[in-house]
Image: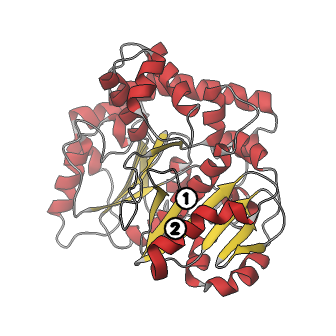
Amino acid sequence: MPPFLPRTAETLVERALATMPVVVLMGARQTGKSTLARMPPRADRRSYVTLDDYDVLGQARTSPSDLVRRAPLLTLDEVQREPDVLLAVKAAVDEDRPRRPGRFLLTGSANLLLMAGVSETLAGRATYVPLWPFTRREQLGLGTAGIWSELLATKPEHWLDLVGSQVAPHEDWSALALRGGYPTPALELEDRAGRELWYDGYVRTYLERDLQMLASIDNLVDFRRLMRAACLRLGGLLNQTDLARDVGLPRQTASRYLSLLETSYQLIRLEPYSVNRTKRLTKTPKLYWSDTGLAAHLAGVSELPGSYLENLVLGDLLAWRDASEPRAEILFWRTHSGEEVDFLIEVGGCLLPVEVKAASRVTPRDARHLQTFRAEYGEAVLGGLVLYGGEEVFWLAEGILAVPWWKVI
């Protein structure tokens, strides 16, 4: 068992426990939620029970009010297994006068805010903290995501010095993408065959157990075929009609399956930037996956396209966004004429566009859509970044810096 590695979300979890009566730690199964919840200082003076224990699950269903009153400070793991326990949590919190901060730490392997049938969201009582798969810097033991906050706080003319000061080591992005960010395959399994066995077991558990808690699926073969088709479209616009046709499903069924994948933190819909000045913009989201290693396994690919490097960058951005205040928006920009910027960070009225290129060399031509974006949105744009697979840091165009991806995430 490897030592506990610090997580980007830890600071926000601790701050929320000191402020709110309920903190809900959400994310896909096997991202490390239970481990994070049971580590000091969160485990100090706090009782822990999990709804994976059938006795606890039974009490959650028959006598939830007794369950939530087991201890003054209580961690309830895997609450998505019996969402009605949230009603008992709400009642217990509302009985407290004054409310006790940190009374409940809940974890769930599904987005409780998106789950059908969840009638209680604990509005005004809870802080929701997503936990994404391990970022690269978390895997290195640094406990952080990329240097996005530093880039936003630094004038573009000083970016060269900021990036040059980074000490994160170089590595092959495709190797990082293939091992993904789930703790076991990323940190414990060293060979591809072992990881493939782990991913196969993960998918089996997800389909046969976790998914059935969210909805009744008549045909798991159809569902898995849709998962594979979605992973083969990584980084592309999400056309649900085309996707449904390609897998032989009614559009309504495909749409429901995609929503289930999103609710269980597998699929990510990246929304487009919608502020239209002079250009017509697309309104269709792009499709990505929570974990690149699992996506590669489902797609059955070993030679990864550049969209997997995009997905790595997006995963890092999401982990950073959800642990930062003020909270940024992560979007993409695309016009109807095909001009596109892969990622757009929007925070405090400022915009930072980011283009991702897997190639080991880039030229000023690779900055042309960033230049178009800067011309379109003017002073709101801080500058632009082209993250690529090479080793040099240099200016591609005015205000647009080419940076090896491994110096940022």
Foreground: 285 or 375? 375
Q: Please report whichever mark, 1 or 2, sits nearer to the chain's N-terminal start.
A: 1
199 sits left or right of 350 in the view: right
- Type of the residue with mark 1: Val
Residue 222: image quadrant is top left
Instruction: Tell me what residue is drawn at x 70 percent, y 39 percent.
Output: 305
Residue 327: image quadrant is bottom left
Residue 262 lies, with reference to residue 369, above or below; the image says: above
Q: Quadrant of the C terminus?
A: bottom right
Q: Is residue 409 visible?
A: no
Q: Position of residue 49 (x, y in %)?
A: 41, 45
Q: Position of residue 342 (x, y in %)?
A: 56, 56
318 sits left or right of 274 in the view: right
Residue 85 lies, with reference to residue 366, above or below; the image says: above
- Type of the residue with mark 2: Phe
Instruction: Tell me what residue is drawn at x 45 percent, y 26 percent.
Output: 243
| Residue carrying label 2 | 373
Q: Position of residue 368 (x, y in %)?
A: 63, 64
Disc 2 crowd, CA 10 A, few/some/many (<14, 14-19, 20+) = some
Q: Is residue 258 visible?
A: yes
| Residue carrying label 1 | 341
Disc 1 crowd, CA 10 A, few/some/many (<14, 14-19, 20+) = many
Foreground: 194 or 282? 282
* Mark 1 and mark 2 residues within 8 Å of each other at the beta carbon: yes
